[in-house]
Amino acid sequence: LRMNTTKTCKCSVPLNRTTPAIAPAPHSSQQQRKRVLQQAILLYPLKEMCLLADREYVGKDWFKFLQDNGLQFIIRLTRHDYKHDISRGRRCYDSMLRSALKGKLCGQDFTLAGQCYQFVALCNEDQPTGDDALVLLISNTRWTHRQIGDRYRIRWLTECLFKHLKSNGFELDELGMTSLPKIRLLVAIASFTASGASMPTIPSRRLKRGNQSFAGATV
């Protein structure tokens, strides 16, 4: 789990970043994610916020952990993730994927390890053909399929931040630093700088209590 952000006033602000070891595994384990999120929960009121995450952030224990801590989530799945469980619903899994490839938004409720979730399938507007043509999502929210799909797209703001950190003048990958405290400090400074530079100008009259329309976290 590398980045948590909050979505407020159409801006994405970094909250928590952890730097992996020098030679990390391809993906974090469920236990590693839990530890990072537990640290963030101690620092920020994350309850009822929505976690947005990519395909490597899956796992039955992970989903239950998020539920138990009062977090909503929308997480992308691969075509093979929980296919059997989703297929137990009233609609055929492969039929939903075919409909999604034709541009239709579809989904259904399903049960996984005793927990109820929503499955949503939609066409990838940014890459409508090829192996990445579908966006398959799991969510514990009760939002509509359209709301789930639209809100998942917010996660791309994190990808934009990573792009700024790796290029656009920051070039953090080229620094060759090995001191973990220094790396964390530098990443924090660069993250806030990049986020601040990309924020739209917001008139002061809009900064009112209760103006937050959607709170979320992305990874």
Image (cartoon, rainbow, N blue to C red):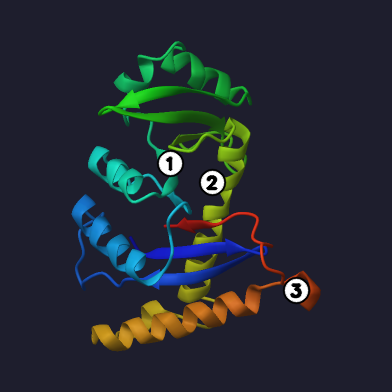
**Helix, strand or loop status at disc 3:** loop
Residue 24 placement (x, y as % from top left): 21, 64
Compared across the picture, whether 136 is left or right of 125 comes to left
Q: Given the image, on which type of amino acid does mark 1 rest? A: Arg
Q: Quadrant of the N terminus?
A: bottom left
215, above or below 139, in the image: below
Q: Given the image, on which type of amino acid does mark 2 rest? A: Tyr
The residues bearing labels 1 and 3 have C-alpha atoms spaced at a distance of 31 Å
Q: Quadrant of the C terminus?
A: bottom left
Q: Nearer the viewer, mark 1 or mark 3?
A: 3
- Residue pictured at 50% horizontal, 30% vertical: 120
Q: Residue 198's mark?
A: none
216, above or below 168, in the image: above
Task: Tell me which label, 3 or 2, sits earlier in the chain.
Answer: 2
Residue 203 placement (x, y as % from top left): 79, 75
Task: Tell me which label, 2 or 1, sits earlier in the chain.
Answer: 1
**Helix, strand or loop status at disc 1:** strand
Mark 2 neighbour class, 10 Å CA radius: few under 14, some 14 to 19, many 20 or more: many
Q: Residue 152's mark?
A: 2
Q: Residue 76's mark?
A: 1
Residue 142 placement (x, y as % from top left): 52, 34
Mark 1 neighbour class, 10 Å CA radius: few under 14, some 14 to 19, many 20 or more: many
48 and 152: which is toward the camera: 48
Residue 63 placement (x, y as % from top left): 31, 42
Q: Given the image, on which type of amino acid does mark 3 rest? A: Ile
- Residue pictured at 54% horizontal, 70% vertical: 13
The residues bearing labels 2 and 1 have C-alpha atoms spaced at a distance of 8 Å
For residue 168, what is the image quadrant? bottom right
Mark 3 neighbour class, 10 Å CA radius: few under 14, some 14 to 19, many 20 or more: few
- Name the residue that disc number 3 marks: 202
48 and 9: which is toward the camera: 48
9, above or below 28, in the image: below
